[in-house]
Amino acid sequence: MTSEDKRNWKPATAMVHAGTMRSGFGETSEALYLTQGYVYDTAEGAEARFKGEEPGFIYSRYANPTVAMFEARMCELEGAEEARATASGMAAVAAALLCSVKAGDHIVAARALFGSCRWVVETLMPRYGIEATLVDGRDLGEWKAAMRPTTKLLFLESPTNPTLEVVDIAAVAEIANEAGARLVVDNVFATPMQQKPLALGAHVVVYSATKHIDGQGRCLGGVVLSDRKWIDEEFHDYFRHTGPSLSPFNAWTLLKGLETLPLRVTQQTRSAARIADHLAGHSAVARVIYPGRKDHPQADIVARQMSGGSTLICFDVKGGKEGAFAFLNALDIVKISNNLGDAKSLVTHPATTTHKNLTDEAREAVGIGGGTLRLSVGLEDADDLIDDIDRALAKAG
Ligand SMILES: *Cc1c(COP(=O)(O)O)cnc(C)c1O
């Protein structure tokens, strides 16, 4: 077996080569090791491997060569020491949060969270005696005021779903450090190409690899990245014994996704920036929120902590829900879907789908109205997308 070691590659090179372990056959593409377990030449060999005295794989719930290649490539991209891949983004989030708290501990989280993340923090955790306080992530005063002596974890996503609010990651990391707590960042919306939470001071980064990392609508996956100490001491046993592991087949698919991630995110962001500017100048559009535009409410923080714009745009069409539905139903190329980060452009009406379970007040607090739409820009030609959007806006108006 030969492996491709870190060589200070730029992301585009690393995403094609980093982490590759070649078998004796010298295959070009990463091998797919569809196996549950491993066999040992001798009883002594099995004993040594279980004692950790000999390197090697034991059982695919713990580790698998194809999954290990995906984890190594993600570490390279994120600048993390260790990673564990999971069966979905939610498996990554739930594991990263649950592994480091116990009854009596307290969590502070930004309230503008992906729906299932919010359920874990707000509904699941309290069942086990872990209290959570939700704050306006943009307001550092609220983070500080929510801290208690028992606060062990801070959790946020930035930019947020769906209104693309931005949280000052470095400032929240400082609040966590002062309290001896850990900051977990869900970096799905920014993608690893546009924001590096660990470099900004976060302790743990989680992804739904289902989104941009696959990017082609094929499989679910997730990943948790951090320093070696945290993975070894806090995460490792939880992961081994609760089994949120990623399937080798999905790891292989995600490895192929990583090969084109830099190209895809660059192109999708370029198209999204053009479409955001176009929407901002359109008379049927009431509001556009796009990280990367000068009129983003937190443009200064975007400039500090993100390297690009976003592949996502949040905008309001005039005419509330009725206007939004007329627009959605008139689209041809852009598909109605709650997914994002795909090669296909996808649009969501959060108030009636992803965020329908929030109360009216909670929806209002995170800026979701009847006319609010979230557009995930795909790989189609931007001119075709703009034509499609214009045609649909004309029908809606
Ligand atoms: C999709 C998503 C998740 C959950 O990921 P799954 O792969 O669907 O489990 C978590 N956080 C954010 C921000 C997401 O967009």
Image (cartoon, helix red, strand yellow):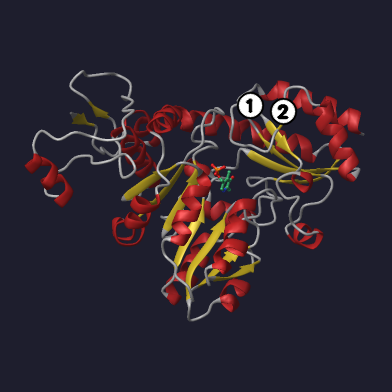
> x and y percent of residue 104 in the render?
49, 76
Label pair 1/2, CB-CB below 8 angstroms: yes
Viewer-proximal residue among 95 and 322:
95
Q: Ligand 1: which quarter?
A: top right
Q: Residue at x 68, y 32 (%)?
A: 346
Look at the numbered disc 1 and give the secondary structure of its residue: loop
For marks 1 and 2 on the same chain, the one whose residue lies earlier in the sequence: 2
Q: Is mark 1 within 8 Å of ligand 1?
A: no
Tell me the crowding category of disc 1: few under 14, some 14 to 19, or many 20 or more residues within 10 angstroms, Cα based.
Answer: some
Q: Residue at x 49, y 72 (%)?
A: 175
- The correct choice, above or below, for 319 with respect to 297 in the image is above
- Residue at far front of view: 43
Q: Is mark 2 within 8 Å of ligand 1?
A: no
Label 2 belongs to which residue? 335
Residue 255 in view of the camera: yes
> x and y percent of residue 214 in the render?
50, 32
Residue 160 in view of the camera: no
Quadrant for residue 14, please give it.
top left
> x and y percent of residue 188 in the render?
54, 45
Residue 344, disc: 1
Q: Residue at x 58, y 72 (%)?
A: 143
